[in-house]
């Protein structure tokens, strides 16, 4: 993913900036600017992973703000793949996110907010993650 053999050229991570109207979020992960997007395929993958019967069930799960670190990894990985990044969940788990767990939670909160665009369920999830972030700080 980082280059093309001995040519020293690097694969472009993104060509354009994120379009929030399409549900895209831009951030730096593992030292590279990346686009994340929860496409329909990514959302379907999350429904299956979390045993959700519908998008509403999935959104309700996220609105609790009670996400495990494994949940953050899965959502980040799905968002990265939806944004055109070729990464597995294991790859995403090894990537460095500025701010650590709190930084990952902030990215996930922003991703959920732009995906659902209602301010309702996703807004609650983002707020809960932000509260978790501030209470987790020393």
Image: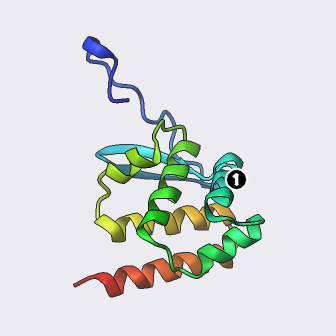
Disc 1 secondary structure class: helix
129 in relation to 81, above or below: below
Q: What residue lies at 29% left-to-right and 53% top-to-bottom? A: 96
The quarter holding residue 5 reads top left
Of the 4 image quadrants, the one containing the N terminus is: top left
Query: Can residue 102 be seen at all in this image of the molecule?
Result: yes
Image vertical order of residue 51 relative to residue 80, above or below: below
Query: Can you say whether 45 is above or below 88 in the image?
Result: below
Q: Residue at x 44, y 58 (%)?
A: 73
Q: Position of residue 67 (x, y in %)?
A: 49, 74
Colouring scheme applied when the structure was drawn: rainbow
Looking at the rendered image, the quarter that the C terminus falls into is bottom left
Q: Give coordinates of residue 42: x percent, y percent.
A: 63, 50
Task: Give the percent coordinates (x, y) of residue 3.
Answer: 32, 23
Please name the residue shown 37% across and 79% down the image. 133
Point out residue 63 in the picture as x, y percentages from the top left corner.
61, 78
- The image quadrant of residue 52 is bottom right
Q: Residue furthest left?
A: 138
Residue in front for this viewpoint, 34 or 19: 34
Instruction: Between residue 33 and residue 45, name the one nearer to us.
Output: 45
Label 1: which residue?
A: 44
Residue 116 placement, left or right of 107: right
Tell me if residue 119 can be seen: no
The residue positioned 28% from the left and 12% from the top of the image is: 7
């Amino acid at each position: 993913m980082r280059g093309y053999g001995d040519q020293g050229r690097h694969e472009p991570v993104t060509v354009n900036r994120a379009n929030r109207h399409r549900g895209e979020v831009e951030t730096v992960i593992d030292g590279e600017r990346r686009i994340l997007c929860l496409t329909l395929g990514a959302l379907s993958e999350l429904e299956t992973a979390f045993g959700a019967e519908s998008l509403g069930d999935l959104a309700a799960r996220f609105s609790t703000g009670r996400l495990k670190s494994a949940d953050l990894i899965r959502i980040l990985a799905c968002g990265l793949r939806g944004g055109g990044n070729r990464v597995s969940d294991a790859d995403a788990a090894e990537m460095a996110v500025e701010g650590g767990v709190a930084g990952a939670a902030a990215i996930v909160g922003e991703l959920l907010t732009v995906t659902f665009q209602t301010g309702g369920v996703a807004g609650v999830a983002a707020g809960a993650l932000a509260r978790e972030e501030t209470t987790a700080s020393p």
